[in-house]
Amino acid sequence: MPRTLFGKLVVVLLALLLATSVFYVALTVTATRLHIQEVTQNLHRDLAADLLKDRPLMTDGKADSGALKKVFEMLMVVNPSIELYLIDPQGQLLAFSAAPGKVKREKVSLAPIQAFLTEGRKLPIRGDDPRDLNQRKIFSVAPVMEAGQVSGYLYVVLGGEIYDSINRTLEASWITRISAGLAIASLLLVTVIGILSIKLLTRRLKRLTGQLEAFKRTDPEGVDGTEGDVGAGGGQALDEIDELALTFEAMSARIDDQIGELERSDSMRRELITNISHDLRTPLASLQGAIETLQIKDQSLSAADKNRYLELAHSHCQRLGRLITDLFDLATLESHDRELHFEPFSLAELVQDVAQKFQPLAARNGLTLKLDIRLNTSLVSADIALIERVLTNLADNAIKYTPAGGTVEMGVARADERIIASVADTGQGIPARELSRVFDRPYRVEKNRGDGTEGAGLGLAIAQRILRLHGGHLDVKSTLGAGSAFSFGLDAV
Ligand SMILES: Nc1ncnc2c1ncn2[C@@H]1O[C@H](COP(=O)(O)OP(=O)(O)O)[C@@H](O)[C@H]1O
Ligand SMILES: [Mg+2]
């Protein structure tokens, strides 16, 4: 079977035309044969009766061999294809005009003979051919009468040659020839017109398939995996309709995906707005409180108090500013608006740079900032600006939450295929029950809320988000009063 729909339709059309032609040819041949048999039998209807006229072929129920011989000889001259049989009233053969070896039957059926003798029966009627056990042929028959009684029948088989003559007639007839020629010509015409129409009709389908194919090529993840599902069955060649079904399925899957994606990002945005307004409310309320106190108690406050409230308002303002920046950063990271720029760089060098940047702050806080780099190369592929942000947030926390005299150590090490960066301190540590919550936004350990250490509670949330975007995560180990250690790994290149 051809692969394309066009090919399949053409094959079906040709098969149908062929079947119809064979049927009509068979029908025509049978009808013509019947017609010729009818005409021949009609023409020879009275042949047997005529032969019997004035010729008593039987005497006392026995064949009169002398009379018979004469008739046989006469017929042999007139028409050798006609065969004569004398039969008794039960159909038993009594005598015939042929060599004994040629006759295969001893008895012929009486039913067709009775039918023939009945007035008004439609011809052709075919009776048993004594020379062939399977054949039936047209005939003429007349009863042999003796003293008003049927003593037998003269059964005249109208010759095998008649069959040949039918074919010859058919072949010779110019009507048959012309109609055969016309039939072949019209068949060819129908075939050509059929093929052209199929081509015309499938062309649009083909064009549509082509367009969908082009669409499919623009959709790399699209169709894969769905191919086996469609009715065509595994491994079978696909025609245009199968292709259409496949592409349609891929398209609807893609639309479903996109709608799902849109819904997800929509709900994410909504959640973000809710979170942000919640995050901003607390510092805003503090700011508002400071300003209101200043307004209401303006007269009763000393200059020093006024100054204190102003400073408080200012610090809340600053905190609000930082919070807004951090929130904005986190929002862009969460909504995938920030594209990652992967590039290979040395993580050890980056850690060194960050440590250097924090050196003055550590010194001011009375801390020792140490570096522990334990490998030669530490190339990773990541977004360098974002990883720097992670290290900055971690170093900032370590310095902020470690009392004077403590140590902060930044390190880089290799573990299998990953490069691990770590920031450890000997600071206050994080209570175990709060350990899992420090990555939430905005979360600050209870002790640090309002203790003077500045922070919006978003630094670790941002760091965790950045590492998730890189396919990793931030790890934390902490012992209350002894220190904390944050670490993360990136794939080595
Ligand atoms: N190195 C650390 N030592 C002790 N506590 C820490 C450390 N790093 C973070 N934390 C706790 O986790 C909380 C969340 O940290 P973070 O998200 O960076 O917010 P922020 O630093 O703004 O408070 C901090 O408020 C602090 O209580
Ligand atoms: Mg922080």
Image (cartoon, rainbow, N blue to C red):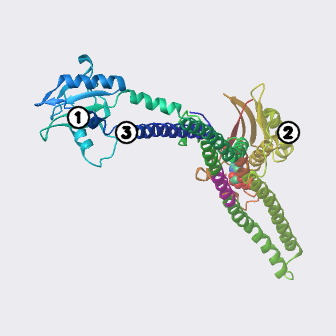
Q: Which residue is mark 2?
A: 356
Q: Which residue in the protein does label 1 denote?
A: 54
Task: Bin the neighbour count of mark 1 within 10 Å (Cα to Cα): few under 14, some 14-19, many 20 and up.
Answer: few
What segment is highlighted magenta in the picture? 254-266
1 or 2: mark nearer the eye: 1
Q: Amino acid at mark 2?
A: Gln
Q: Indicate the amino acid at tag 3.
A: Leu
In this picture, is 324 found above or below 247? below
The residue sitting at the right extreme is 303
The answer to whether mark 2 and mark 3 are in CB contact below 8 A is no
Q: Is residue 257 magenta?
A: yes
Specify the principal SS of the magenta part.
helix
Give the SS element for disc 1: loop
Q: Which residue is mark 3?
A: 43
Classed neighbour count for the residue bearing mark 3: other residues with Cα under 10 Å, few (<14), some (14–19), many (≥20):
few
The numbered mark, 1 or 2, whose residue comes first in the sequence reads 1
Amino acid marked by disc 1:
Asp
User: Could you say whether the residue bearing mark 3 is in a helix, strand or loop?
Assistant: helix
Tell me: is circle 2 under 8 Å from ligand 1.
Answer: no
Instruction: Estimate the x, y position of residue 164 in percent, counting from the top left.
Output: 42, 27
Pinpoint residue 203: horizontal percent, then vertical percent: 69, 45
